[in-house]
Amino acid sequence: MTSLPATAPRPATGMEGPPSEQVRVDGRWADLERLRNGHPMMDAVIDEVDGRRIRVGDHWLSDFASCNYLGFDLHPQIIEAVAPALAKWGTHPSWSRLLGNPRPYVEIEERLTELLGAPDTLVLPTISLIHTSVIPLLVGRGAVLVDAQAHKTIYDGAAIARGAGATLHRVRPNDPDHLVQLLRHFPAGVMKLVCLDGVNSMTGNTPDLNQFAQICRDNGALLYVDDAHGFGLIGEAPGTGAPWGRRGNGTVRFYDESYQNLIMVAGFSKAYSSLAAFLALPTALKNYLKVAAPPYLYSGPSPMASLATVIAGLDVNDAEGDEIRSSLQDKTKRVLGQISRLGLRTLNTSGLPVIELPLGHADDIDAVGRFLFERGIYVTLAPYPLVPRAQVGFRIQVTAANDDEQVEHLNQVLAELAERFEMQRAVGPV
Ligand SMILES: Cc1ncc(COP(=O)(O)O)c(C=O)c1O
């Protein structure tokens, strides 16, 4: 191992100057640090779970901050799949995937490819690792165009791509006309990668994927869709009559879109309650990523327990997934119905279980969060700078494991909240 000569400049750590114990968090992170440091719903330690109830200290709360949409984290068949897998394979393979792939990877990729109706699939540990490694490889020194509301981890990938010579362009949120305008500006031959969310993690809505895919094809661009929240929730729809479609095979299938000129990225860490992620992609690209994408070559892989719960999750999805989604849909409807009756504004127009409620005054975030906590409701706070000041609020996620009593309790507390705090109001008749 080589050590730095004494005269070498210190690597930029962002911590030059004061020793670490004196680091002050200020600037745009100060609001968030204040909440983190003193708010019961931030950086909390969860002492115990009981179904979808959690205990923080001596306080039991209904958990509406979980992204375990299908309740697979608590499903007995999925939990029981872990011990036999560990007995057979040990806890963790430890080889990077290029060095050695325990057979469950093969089964997961084959089953996923069939479920998605994709040309091929590649499993890597997380979506964040996929974005930061694959976006730069796909775009090279071309142009990466990112929807302004796309997930932060897409921006991280795009920023790395920019560091390697790409140009980075922000597309107005969900604005196809702006995308066309930007795409026309590039000379032929420039690689163009357009990145957006499938189901958006804050609004809970989807873009019109057919329109975006067509624009990309017409303008020689590759579309890259992060479907972290769509996979498991929505799926193939034509002719099913089911509002969320069937099989939970993602936003691309929901729109009956093809994978031509389209890469879909999603993961198991939301609806499937497991730690692994994947790309749906052509086989030639998969083989390229096997030698070029660092997470395939170097990263520690997903633990065996995660691979086991993915496989069991695919089984449960086959057997009961549509029934579970239907029950989740009913619960979500009841929450959205109450929000509508109370005249509150939500960004959610899709009916999916990702429901952000913006506050009337961003500065109320602390008090609103404490009120919800005291009333036994746990949600995801969305403070500045995680969202723009005008969208500061909280996000409710409904999961199949929230029972009817919890949904009633949430609706009651929302009514009390609307009496006590100024919330943004829905425009138009309610
Ligand atoms: C839209 C979206 N993309 C990516 C991620 C990160 O996923 P992972 O934990 O697999 O890195 C999240 C997680 O919150 C997300 O919501």
Image (tube, rainbow, N blue to C red):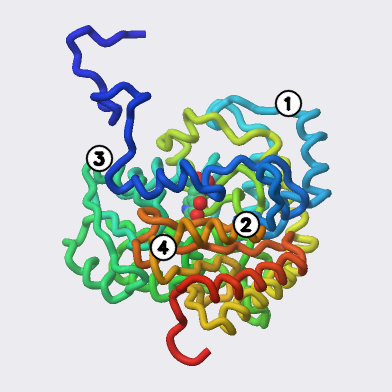
Q: Position of residue 210 (x, y in %)?
A: 44, 74
Q: Nearer the viewer, mark 3 or mark 4?
A: 4
Q: Residue at x 67, y 78 (%)?
A: 242
Q: Are marks 3 and 2 in contact (CB under 8 Å)?
A: no
Q: Residue furthest bottom?
A: 429
Camera-nearest label, 1 or 4:
4
**Disc 1: residue Cβ within 8 A of ligand 1's nearest atom:** no
Is residue 75 in view from this perspective? yes
Crowd band around label 4 with a 10 angstrom C-alpha radius: few (<14), some (14–19), many (20+):
many
Q: Which residue is mark 3?
A: 164
Q: Which mark is residue 374?
A: 2
Front residue of 166 and 370: 370
Q: On the image, numbered disc 4 is attached to which residue?
A: 392
Viewer-proximal residue among 408 and 9: 408
Is the residue 245 above or below the residue 221 in the image?
below
Residue 88: quarter of image: top right
Cα separation, mark 1 vs mark 4, equals: 44 Å
Q: CA distance from mark 1 to mark 2?
A: 43 Å
* Dot placed on the residue nearer the N-terminal end, 1 or 3: 1
Secondary structure beneath dot 4 equals loop
Of callouts 1 and 4, which one flags the residue occurring earlier in the amino acid sequence?
A: 1
Residue underneath mark 1: 90
Q: Earlier in the sequence, mark 4 or mark 2?
A: 2
Q: Position of residue 191 (x, y in %)?
A: 27, 55
